[in-house]
Structure formats: structure tokens, C-alpha cells
Image: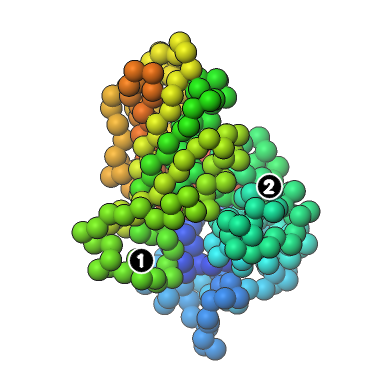
Amino acid sequence: MSKKPKIAVIGSTGYSGAEIIRLLLKHGQINLNTLMTSNEERISSKSISISQALPQFINQCNLPIEPLNSSLLKERGIDLVFLATPNESSHRVIPELLRHNLQVIDLSGAFRLRDIDQYSKWYGFKHLFPSELELSVYGLTEINRLEIKNAQLLANPGCYPTSILLPLIPLHRANLIDYNSTIICDSKSGVSGAGKSPSTATHFSEVTENFNAYKVNQHQHSPEIWQELGNSKVIFTPHLLPINRGILSTIYVKLSDPVDAKDVSDCLNLNYSNESMVRLFKEGTLPQVKYVAHTNFCDIGWEIAGTHLIIVSAIDNLGKGAAGQAVQNMNVMLGLEETLGLI
């Protein structure tokens, strides 16, 4: 590109929005032009800057936080919009952004599921935009890179699914996993995965010195995992860790006969040895959350246990699980070096 692409962030004061801004400020090849709020966010009559709202950006970024205005984005020549807004906000706003021919990366779940009838059950609202849903590309970068290059609307993956799908998809596609057996995904996330809006479950006194499962058999990321893996025989249970950020997923699968450790190693290396954002550990050496905190890496380790494979993956839920993967996808969509702003 002869000039730096102009970028806007909507939902700029939430955890994911702020992380996107942090990454874009060190990117070097884009122009962070506009910051906006979603309609649900309250804004004062007196405009404030991002550095006033989030003091970590003092002397780094003083862009004003403006009300959402898709026409203004078009007038300013914005090339790509990050939408770090709640599910129903994204659902309502995205058709308008697409009508202005803007490229959109949506960090919500509003356009991840291809079956439009699933939204009422898993997200609590009726999806009203089937044609826009048809346009949506699922943004698991290492798996769907070719489709991402030409996407106008990109559905950034959920944090839990990213940690589960990256190790499982290559093994599943290579027929190394027994299709008749259930896959168990036991995942734990830091509190920032719940978003910035306060709730009883995320109060300090509820989280500290505690560890609990939640949304068992009810989490909205379950159908996303089933869809992208092409296998509904997956039991996914999320847990809340008393840490700020990070996800550790322990995944149990039955191997096809006569798959062995070399088959597993060869498959993962074939798919990921040249990927800059996926780090493979040797058999028996396992990832930890602290290795991936504040990065865009997905670390994958594994161990053979008889006829079963135990996989441990780790990501930062705000990095590879949200903002980092979104910036990685932006780089792919704009034809830029994929790791810009991330390493």
C-alpha cells in the first residue's frame, strides 16, 4: 500500500479495545485514526480523549472518544474497523458498516456461528442479518488465512475456541483422532475474559483464592468449537482462574489405531513449524500461562497416555484470544507483514 491504512476502533475503552490500541500504537504501518464508543456506552456531553479515559495512554495517544457514527467513518476514509463491542451491539452495527464498504473485524460472537437459528439459544437474541452472516469469515488465522485475505467481515474467534481448535484441527483433519470417542476440553481463563462490565461473579472477593467451573454445558463457545472442528462429540467446560489474563486448556482425545507419538509430532510440525505465532513444545514439555502472558503466541504441548493423547495449550485471552489475533488478522487482510505490532 502506498499510504498507511486508516484504522478505527469502536468500543475503545473495554479490555479488548484498549489492548488493540496498545498493539496498534507500536505497529508502525497503520494510521490509528478514530476511536468511538458503541451506542450502549455512556459518553459525557464533554468529549474526552482516550488518555483521559485510560491513563496508560498518556503521552501515547490523545485521540478523542467519539459516539458511534458509521457515516463519519466513511467520510474520514477509514479502511478497517475493529469492533470490540457486545454481541448485540455488533449484530446491530455491522450491516451499517458493511453498507459503507468498510472492512470489519468483529471481536464479538455476533457473526461466528453459521447456523442463524443457533443465536437465540446460545447468545440470547434472534439474528436478523442472514446475508451479512453469509459474508462472515471465521478468523482463526493459521487455519483460514486464504479466506481471511479477502474478507470484508471477519468474525474474530472466541478465546476458548482458539486455545482448543489450534491444536485439535490438524489432528482431526489428519484422521489421528478416533471419531467415535468424546473429546474432553477442560479450560481455565483469567478474569479479563469476562469483559469489563462488573458482575457478582467477577468481584475480587469472589475470585481471589477461588477456582470454579461455570456455564457447564451452557457456554456460548461450545457450538463454535463444534462447528469449526466439524465434530459435536466435544465436552467443553470453562473455569475461572484468579488471575487477570491467560487461558490454559487441557484436552483429552482417544487416538485412532495405530497412531503413535511420531504421528502426532509429525502432524503438528507439518502444520505449525513455520507459523510465527504458534510454538510447539516437545513431547512431555508443557506450556504455562506465564509463558504467553502479554503475547500473541499459542503454545502447544502434549503427552501420550496409552491410547489417549493429552494436549495442553496456553494463550493470553486478550492476546491470541482477542486483540492480538484481531491485529494479526488485520495484517493479513491489509496485505501487511503478519507479525507487525505483535513481536
Residue at image coords 35%, 43%: 248
Residue at point 49% right, 44% down? 161
Rendered location of residue 276, percent (x, y): 46, 33
| CB within 8 Å, label 1 to label 2 | no
Q: Nearer the viewer, residue 178 or 174?
A: 178
Q: Residue furthest top?
A: 258
* Residue 334 in the image: above or below residue 204: above
Q: Horizontal placement of 91 versus 320: left or right?
A: right
Residue 4 appears left or right of 171:
right
The image position of residue 206, as x and y in percent, is 28, 66
| Camera-side residue of 97 and 110 | 110
Q: Secondary structure at mark 2?
A: loop
* SS assignment at label 1: helix
Q: Which residue is mark 1?
A: 201
Residue type (three-letter) at the residue carrying disc 1: Ala
Mark 2 — residue?
A: 114
Rendering quarter of residue 225:
top right
Q: Give the Cα separation between the discs numbered 1 and 2.
A: 30 Å
**Mark 2 is on which residue type?**
Arg
**Looking at the picture, does residue 165 appear above or below residue 103?**
above
Q: Is residue 42 above or below residue 164?
A: below
Using a 10 Å C-alpha cutoff, classify the residue at mark 1 as few (fewer than 14 neighbours), some (14 to 19) or many (20 or more). Answer: few
Q: Is residue 230 above or below residue 284?
A: below
Which residue corresponds to the image point at 49% horizontal and 27% vertical from the top-left?
181
Residue 319 in view, yes or no: no
Camera sees residue 213:
yes
Looking at the image, tell me whether mark 1 or mark 2 is earlier in sequence order.
Answer: 2
